[in-house]
Image: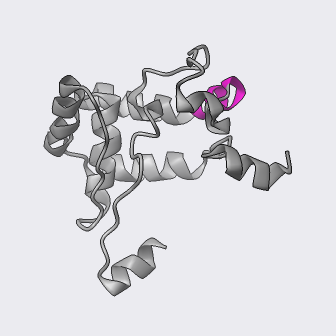
Amino acid sequence: MLPTLEELGIGFVPYSPLGKGFLTGKINEDTKFDSSDFRSQIPRFRPEARKANLVLVDLVGKIAQRKKATPAQIALAWLLALKPWIVPIPGTTKLERLDENIGAVRVELTSADLREIASAASNIKVQGARYPEMHEQLTGR
């Protein structure tokens, strides 16, 4: 899809660029979601999927430590560094998270960093559907 968007000169706004909070590094396999939290219904947030997907969070966290940034800043900086027409817009209700997210523009990812992320991400098969209805369509249950 991205090559087509680039060819046509169309911008891309990634939906939920922090993975509904998962890429912030604050969610792990033991995190409990209240039944009123939408993530409690999402297959990707089931404990077994979270456990499998933590390898992606670990990658982002490792780079964040090296860059003296937060995992959220690395995730956003990565998107910003991919193409100038990719514009992530993370949602938040907390001022400190807004400040943190804005800080992503100050994170400089080198071409080596970008290759490391791309290489590692290409070897990660994300577990769990993004939404309950997708899970039903994929599994028939």
Q: Position of residue 36 (x, y in %)?
A: 54, 23
Residue at left offset 29%, top offset 82%: 9
Q: x, y (%) of residue 74?
A: 31, 38
Q: Is residue 11 magenta?
A: no
Say which of 126 and 134 sits in front: 134
Which picture quadrant has residue 60?
top left
**Viewer-proximal residue, 135 or 22?**
135
Which residues are drawn in magenta?
A: 47-54
Q: Is residue 115 above or below residue 69?
A: below
Query: Residue at position x 68%, y 37% from top?
Result: 43
Would residue 101 be seen by someone viewing this image from the given angle?
yes
Q: Which residue is at 39% across, 77% downward?
A: 5
Q: Horizontal and vertical percent for residue 86?
A: 30, 62
Q: Is residue 97 left or right of residue 79?
A: left
Residue 128 position by quadrant: top right
Residue at image position (35%, 86%) is 8
Colour style of the rendered protein structure: one colour
Q: Is residue 56 above or below residue 96?
A: below
Q: Is residue 111 visible?
A: no
- Image: 50 above or below 11: above
Kindly give the residue lying farthest to the right in the view shown: 140
Describe residue 12's horizontal placement relative to residue 117 as left or right.
left
Q: Residue furthest front?
A: 36
Q: Nearer the viewer, residue 58 or 112?
A: 58
Instruction: Count the numbered circles shown.
Output: 0
Residue 16 percent across, percent down from the top left: 41, 46
Dominant SS type (magenta): helix
Q: Quadrant of the C terminus?
A: top right
